[in-house]
Image (cartoon, helix red, strand yellow):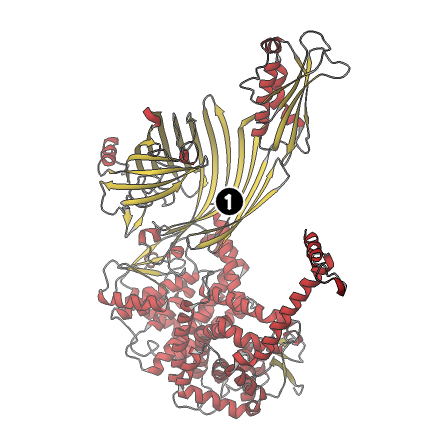
């Protein structure tokens, strides 16, 4: 009973304890239930016991390690860390229903805006993951997740020819906006969904909404709508302040905001330097190749005969050219 | 349906009243239709009956391919074709028929949430049982799904559909579940519905809404379909208020048709009595 | 044409000086001196040996049929003629890049004094040739990869593979062709393919995956082909606005059919023939070898050409067909006939005639179409003898009808139905020949007899294709 549980999660950024929705759900629930888990924030999924993040390493022989948020929460409940203890049966049913609502209506749009929408993916998501995942995974993993998420959207919608674009975006965002409005209506002016103490539903809602709130995306339609729903915005900030106070002082948030504002100029000096270097390299290698194979030859001409042998030089070059 | 198409549809359809010859299309009732399609079709039929809109049920072997979204059932109203319960509800709303007008905001939020619960858990569980459980797939789903086609097309189509559904299950994380876990999920879902229903006649007290139609569609089909084992049926039966709920709706809205199941376009098992 | 080198025997003494005779065109034998020619023709020769040099993977026994005829030659001119014919036969097999014939006196121990050796020097085609094309068409680009393997097993079998990868669809085709040894006209082929097509006039998308085997053989003056085909057809709507009648046809079906085609072609060319006639009769029976579709389909094509004064040609053609469903199942939209467009009844939009529903054309079960053309060379004959010969002007009159029949009525009712509502058109245009396979047309058409629901294209209409009414 006293053996500590170890939780492996994605690292945090932008003021969030973690960048990944599932990790956020598990972290929030652990805080709400007061479970003494030892949190490892890593960026390499291969280092986790199950190969995916988040995952909970238990010391029990027959359970081993668990990976999905629902499984992790069930296990924590079994260990008597239950944030839903005080809920009535009806509230428990409501939890299931609203979690389904989140998964069906909000999660696809969240996946789309972070991983499928081209501008967001390239500017924000891929950049963060590429910078933070260790070599050599940082070349493979973001792209793989991108393809996986697009395939998942295709399968769930039942259309194998789906392409990211305005049409798909409109449909997904319409559902997501409706979902957020419904959540806002259900929350009303309460502090948490079921009274004054948080429950697993709060963990799920927090996990889905806080990335939208905190990650600054170039294409931020969902963000705008969420910001217009005051009670939800207040709700997320509340949870962050109460349960994850240390994250607010994350230095990376500064850099990221600076990045997003001056993204064009930020890499300017490097960009220019890289361009010049690459052009010089290309020229140098072409010249080297030409000299080595004899297409162009450099002849040393004695100083005295500069005017005369110019003809021979050029003729010599012509011969070489053939 | 896309947002632009929806707007267009609601503008155009709002002008015409509901015609007499509206038709609902689903796969063949006796030989072809499967559990999940039967449940969805019954939900739509229940909803339309609750709205007092007449609709004829027409069975076609290629209903799934005729549908614009690839899912059954779909209705052909005038010259519009609309598939799945969600869009159909919006379509009828544009024509001025709605069951959920009397709900306040919180209730509407709850209604939508519970509908998603049914879609997320019950429908996915039905698909899992049909296609990912080896016995059910081999004995029931594949033979039924491919019955209108001749050899070797029947095998190709059945395996293609099975593979597609299995991929979907993997994508949403259900592939690792065992059959017992899926039954457990269904039980949990029924428990949640039972809790919500309580002792009321319908989910939102006196009047049925689209949530009632959807729950009825799925639960009635689960109760009356013969699968490889009766475990699922017993689990659903154990919630007596849900059983009473299904009986109530069947008596109120489906009693005018014959007692036999064939007119409802699905088969397998008699009615609940 | 190739060259035939022949060293002839001196007519008088046995061992005389050697003369070289070069003949470039066997049909017109080289006339040297009267006496020599006469002697050459009359000289009895025996062909003792016929070799083929340069064979790699081709099996020798296969080629003996083609060259066997040479042994029967009786005199030198006969040898040259038969050698030339054998050379053409060898080239026709499609396995050699070039063939040269060398006729020489017999050498060696058992050489007869009037014996000849004929040697065919061949260069085989490469084992595998590939091609890569890119095509850009209606809002679609595609990459086409082709692979050809002639003479795979040594007996003129041919293997071809084509793969097309496009932005919207991919398709492929694999085929294997084997002629009968000694009788190239008899051959059989096996094909495996996947083809996708989009038909905007019906708002229909069709994907066919199929396998077919066919067997061709000549019979007296006609050419017959027997074919079995099994196709998995997938139909779908091209747009959300497709009519419900087309939507009802969506889905999968399997067609397994036996077909027979007979062709008699006495024309001098397939494109812009000047004389001759063509008769093609095609029938297809589906359903008795499995599958969902069940019908009997008949189709014929008739064409006459006749030269008139001043190098103009009068051409008349007649097409017709009918589709009889067997059993209660209605016919599928993919089996029906379509009419209209620059390649059939000109003046109407592509396949936009006949039964339709909300703007989508559903095709008909019975049709007939006829055309009368008068082809003349371009006025004032520009580019005569060269480029100008590719063009012709033509004056045409087309007529046709496409409808569904109620098979319960008698033949009298059928004829009456076909005769009413005839669509017809007339006009003038320019035709350009593309090689020997295709032709381009630019016409000015005036459609008449238009029925409600048809879509016309009056005025200028452009057409390209291989089969024109």
Residue shown at the point (29%, 38%) measured from the top left: C428
Choose top left, top right, bottom left or bottom right for residue C323.
top left
Quadrant where the N terminus of chain A sits is bottom right
Residue for point 40% across, 29% down: C273
Residue sitting nearer the eye, C91 or B181:
C91
Q: Looking at the picture, how far across and down is residue B150, in whole percent?
A: 45, 45
Identify the element where label 1 is drawn. strand
Q: How far from the left and from the top, in percent, is residue B130? A: 48, 61
Mark 1, Cα crowd under 10 Å, few <14 / some 14-19 / many 20+, is: some
Is residue A193 visible from the viewing direction of this image?
no
* Chain of residue at mark 1: C
The residue that disc 1 covers is C193
To which quarter of the image does residue C328 belong?
A: top left
Residue found at the far top of this picture: C12
Query: Is residue B238 visible to the viewer in this orientation of the structure?
Result: yes
Q: Is residue A311 above or below residue B246?
A: above
Tell me which residue sits at (40%, 55%) in the image: B65
| Residue B177: % across, % down | 55, 68
In the rendered view, would you say A131 is above or below B224?
A: below
How many numbered discs sit on the rendered protein? 1
Q: Nearer the viewer, residue C453 or C394?
A: C394
């Amino acid at each position: 009973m006293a053996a500590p549980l170890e939780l492996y999660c994605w690292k945090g950024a932008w003021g969030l304890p973690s960048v990944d929705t599932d990790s956020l759900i598990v972290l929030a629930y652990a805080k709400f239930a007061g479970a003494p888990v030892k949190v490892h924030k890593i960026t390499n999924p291969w280092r986790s016991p199950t190969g995916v993040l988040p995952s909970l390493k238990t010391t029990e022989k027959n359970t081993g390690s668990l990976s999905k948020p629902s499984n992790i929460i069930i296990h924590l409940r079994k260990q008597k860390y239950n944030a839903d203890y005080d809920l009535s049966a009806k509230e428990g049913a409501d939890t299931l229903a609203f979690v389904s609502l989140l998964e069906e209506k909000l999660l696809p749009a969240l996946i789309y805006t972070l991983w499928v929408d081209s501008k967001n993916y390239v500017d924000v998501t891929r950049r963060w993951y590429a910078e933070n995942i260790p070599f050599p995974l940082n070349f493979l993993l973001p792209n793989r997740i991108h393809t996986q998420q697009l395939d998942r959207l295709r399968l769930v919608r039942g259309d194998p020819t789906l392409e990211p674009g305005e049409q798909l975006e409109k449909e997904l965002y319409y559902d997501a906006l409706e979902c957020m409005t419904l959540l806002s209506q259900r929350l009303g002016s309460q502090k948490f969904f079921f009274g004054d103490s948080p429950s697993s539903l709060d963990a799920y809602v927090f996990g889905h909404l806080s990335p939208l709130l905190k990650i600054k995306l170039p294409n931020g339609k969902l963000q705008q709508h969420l910001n217009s729903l005051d009670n939800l915005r207040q709700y997320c900030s509340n949870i962050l302040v109460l349960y994850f106070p240390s994250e607010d002082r994350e230095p990376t948030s500064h850099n990221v905001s600076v990045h997003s504002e001056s993204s064009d100029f930020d890499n300017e000096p490097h960009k220019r330097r890289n361009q010049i270097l690459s052009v010089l390299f290309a020229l140098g290698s072409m010249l080297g190749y030409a000299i080595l194979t004899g297409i162009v030859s450099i002849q040393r001409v004695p100083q005295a005969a500069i005017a005369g042998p110019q003809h021979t030089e050029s003729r010599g070059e012509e011969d070489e050219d053939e | 349906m896309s947002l632009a198409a929806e707007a267009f549809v609601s503008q155009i359809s709002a002008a015409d009243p509901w015609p007499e010859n509206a038709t609902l299309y689903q796969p063949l009732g006796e030989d072809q239709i499967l559990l999940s399609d039967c449940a969805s079709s019954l939900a739509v039929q229940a909803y339309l009956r609750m709205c007092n809109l007449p609709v004829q049920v027409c069975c076609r072997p290629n209903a799934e391919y005729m549908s614009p979204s690839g899912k059954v059932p779909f209705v052909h109203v005038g010259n519009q074709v609309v598939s799945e319960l969600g869009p159909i509800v919006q379509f009828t709303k544009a024509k001025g028929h709605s069951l959920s007008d009397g709900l306040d905001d919180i209730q509407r939020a709850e209604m939508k949430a519970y509908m998603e619960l049914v879609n997320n858990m019950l429908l996915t569980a039905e698909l899992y049982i049909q296609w990912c459980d080896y016995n059910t797939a081999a004995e029931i789903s594949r033979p039924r799904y491919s019955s209108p086609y001749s050899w070797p097309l029947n095998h190709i189509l059945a395996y293609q559909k099975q593979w597609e559904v299995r991929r979907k299950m993997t994508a949403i994380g259900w592939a690792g579940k065992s059959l017992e876990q899926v039954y457990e999920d269904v039980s949990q879902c029924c428990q949640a519905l039972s809790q919500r229903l309580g002792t009321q006649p319908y989910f939102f007290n006196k009047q049925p809404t689209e949530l009632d139609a959807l729950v009825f569609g799925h639960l009635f089909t689960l109760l009356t379909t013969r699968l490889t084992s009766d475990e699922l049926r017993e689990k659903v039966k154990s919630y007596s208020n849900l059983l009473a709920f299904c009986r109530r709706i069947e008596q109120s809205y489906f009693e005018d048709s014959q007692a036999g199941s064939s007119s409802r376009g699905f088969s397998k098992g008699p009615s609940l009595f | 044409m190739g060259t035939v080198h022949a060293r002839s025997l001196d007519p008088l003494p046995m061992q005389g000086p050697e003369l070289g005779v070069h003949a470039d065109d066997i049909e017109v034998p080289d006339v040297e001196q009267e006496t020599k020619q006469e002697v050459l023709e009359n000289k009895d020769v025996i062909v003792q040996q016929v070799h083929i040099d340069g064979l790699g993977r081709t099996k020798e026994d296969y080629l003996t049929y083609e060259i066997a005829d040479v042994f029967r030659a009786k005199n030198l001119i006969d040898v040259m003629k038969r050698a030339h014919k054998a050379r053409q036969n060898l080239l026709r097999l499609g396995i050699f890049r070039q063939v040269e014939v060398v006729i020489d006196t017999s050498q060696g121990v058992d050489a007869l004094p009037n014996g000849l050796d004929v040697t065919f020097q061949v260069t085989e085609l490469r084992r595998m040739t590939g091609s890569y094309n890119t095509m850009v068409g209606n809002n679609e680009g595609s990459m086409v990869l082709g692979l050809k393997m002639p003479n795979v097993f040594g007996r003129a079998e041919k293997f071809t593979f084509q793969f097309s990868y496009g932005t919207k669809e991919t398709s492929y085709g694999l085929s294997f062709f084997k002629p009968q040894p000694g009788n190239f006209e008899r051959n059989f082929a096996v094909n495996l393919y996947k083809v996708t097509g989009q038909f905007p006039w019906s708002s229909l998308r069709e994907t066919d995956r199929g396998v077919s085997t066919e067997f061709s053989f000549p019979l007296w003056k006609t050419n017959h082909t027997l074919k079995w085909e099994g196709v998995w057809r997938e139909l779908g709507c091209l747009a959300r606005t497709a009519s419900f009648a087309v939507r009802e046809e969506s889905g999968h079906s399997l067609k397994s059919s036996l077909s027979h085609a007979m062709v008699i072609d006495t024309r001098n060319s397939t494109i812009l023939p000047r004389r001759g006639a063509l008769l093609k009769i095609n029938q297809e029976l589906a359903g008795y070898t499995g599958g969902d579709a069940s019908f009997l389909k008949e189709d014929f094509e008739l064409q006459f050409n006749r030269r008139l004064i001043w190098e103009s040609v009068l051409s008349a053609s007649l097409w017709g067909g009918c589709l009889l469903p067997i059993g209660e199942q209605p016919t599928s939209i993919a089996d029906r006939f379509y009419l209209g467009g620059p390649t059939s009844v000109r003046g109407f939009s592509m396949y936009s005639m006949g039964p339709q529903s909300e703007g989508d054309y559903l095709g008909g079960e019975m049709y007939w179409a006829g055309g009368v053309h008068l082809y003349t060379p371009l006025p004032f004959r520009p580019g005569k003898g060269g480029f100008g010969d590719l063009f012709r002007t033509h004056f045409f009159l087309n007529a046709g009808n496409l409808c569904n029949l109620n098979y319960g009525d008698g033949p009298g009712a059928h004829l009456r139905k076909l005769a009413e509502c005839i669509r017809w058109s007339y006009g003038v245009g320019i035709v350009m020949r593309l090689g020997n396979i295709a032709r381009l047309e630019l016409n000015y058409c005036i459609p008449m007899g238009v029925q409600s629901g048809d879509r016309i294209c009056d005025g200028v209409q452009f057409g390209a294709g291989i089969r024109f009414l």
